[in-house]
Image (cartoon, rainbow, N blue to C red):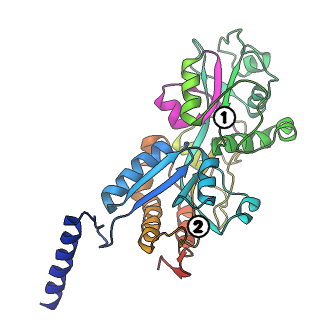
Amino acid sequence: MKKIFLSIITLTLAIAMVSCGEKVTNDSRKAQELSGAGATFPLPFYNVVFEQFGQVKGDQVAYGGIGSGGGVRNLRDKIVDFAGSDAFLSDKEMAEMDPVIHIPACMGAVVLAYNLDGVKELTLSGEIIADIFAGNIKMWNDKRLAALNPDVTLPAEAIIPVYRSDGSGTTFVFTDYLTKVSPMWKEKFGAGKSVNFPSGQAAKGNPGVAGVIKQTKNTIGYVGSEYAFAQKIAYAKIQNRRGEVVEATAASISAAASGEIPTDTRCSITNSDAAGAYPISTFTWLIIYKEQNYSDRSKEQAIATLDLLKYILSDKAQGITSEVHYAPLPAKAKELSMKNLKNVTFDGAAIVQ
């Protein structure tokens, strides 16, 4: 009888809070409004999963796709609950901030989208991609491109590379790959969120790059696979480290993550040696502070942040990935992430038990 009475009181309080304008989650805590910013690469996945999280938990998540660099800056300034980044923070970047934790959200592919009249299939190699973006291969009918595509009639037109104008994790993933496959690229340009591309056209965000390619003939650019798919833009198959010609699919992206994953999940999986691996695959991360009591955040806000991350790691959320042209996390990445969440604190006390 006492349990029934307590349940009635709890329900009455919840109804009272809702009637006063305060929403209550199914965990009987006040619903929170969370904010994040960063990578545009996983934005189509986040749009779906954040909405579903709101329906399940009652919390609302606002996310600004401003590029990985902008998201990390916002987190460094402590004006968001989390940052989205396709590039894990370097040791130097981490030393400049309070301790953070990386939680992979999903896996994806950076593809080489192109706009060529009459060309429905195109094969590229890492060295050729590097030479195109370095300005060493200038024409579509270059003999090296023709040799890789003997059954394709390539136009005698100038190549227009398209690249990111903003600080971008997608650029980091792309250039990280190029440094592994091209000594020339490694020496002259290197890897980074921003790189001095010698020629071509710049655009902001994955949507911007995809838009330029769709509207401009003879272009080629690097974008998240979902953006090429959504815009119905053709994208190339790429020779991997084993010499296999591979298309970006959930299976080929997953194959790239078949190796060891470090405890903190910060790792590059570009140019994987695994059979069937798509060579420009990556994790994309949500980054949070280990100590959640900052900028007048409440403990309930911290709990909601961890609830969001646990939801993204759940089978339900990971099942959405392939529907929007990403790939689910391997079991090891989810296992390590759940362990890492146990280290998150509020006023020094662990939040996840």
For label 2, the SS is strand
Query: How far is mark 2 from mark 1, CA to CA?
Result: 28 Å
The residue sitting at 44% across, 41% down in the picture is 324
User: Which residue is more in the foreground, 147 or 82?
Assistant: 82
The answer to whether 298 is drawn above or below residue 140 in the figure is below
Three-letter amino acid code at the position of disc 2: Tyr
The answer to whether 88 is drawn above or below residue 2 in the figure is above
**Residue 191, quarter of picture:** top right
The residue sitting at 55% across, 66% down in the picture is 337
Query: In the drawing, what numbered circle is on residue 165?
Result: 1
Three-letter amino acid code at the position of disc 1: Ser
Residue 180: percent from the left, percent from the top?
A: 78, 43
**Pointer 2 with pointer 1, Cβ within 8 A:** no
User: Which residue is more in the foreground, 281 or 194?
Assistant: 194
Crowdedness of circle 2 by 10 Å Cα count: few (<14), some, many (20+)?
many
Is 226 magenta? The answer is: yes
Q: Which residue is mark 2?
A: 289
**Which range is magenta?**
217-241
Could you tell whether 32 is left or right of 193 in the image? left
Query: In the drawing, what numbered circle is on residue 333?
Result: none
User: Which residue is more in the foreground, 352 or 208?
Assistant: 208
Could you tell whether 286 is left or right of 131 in the image? left
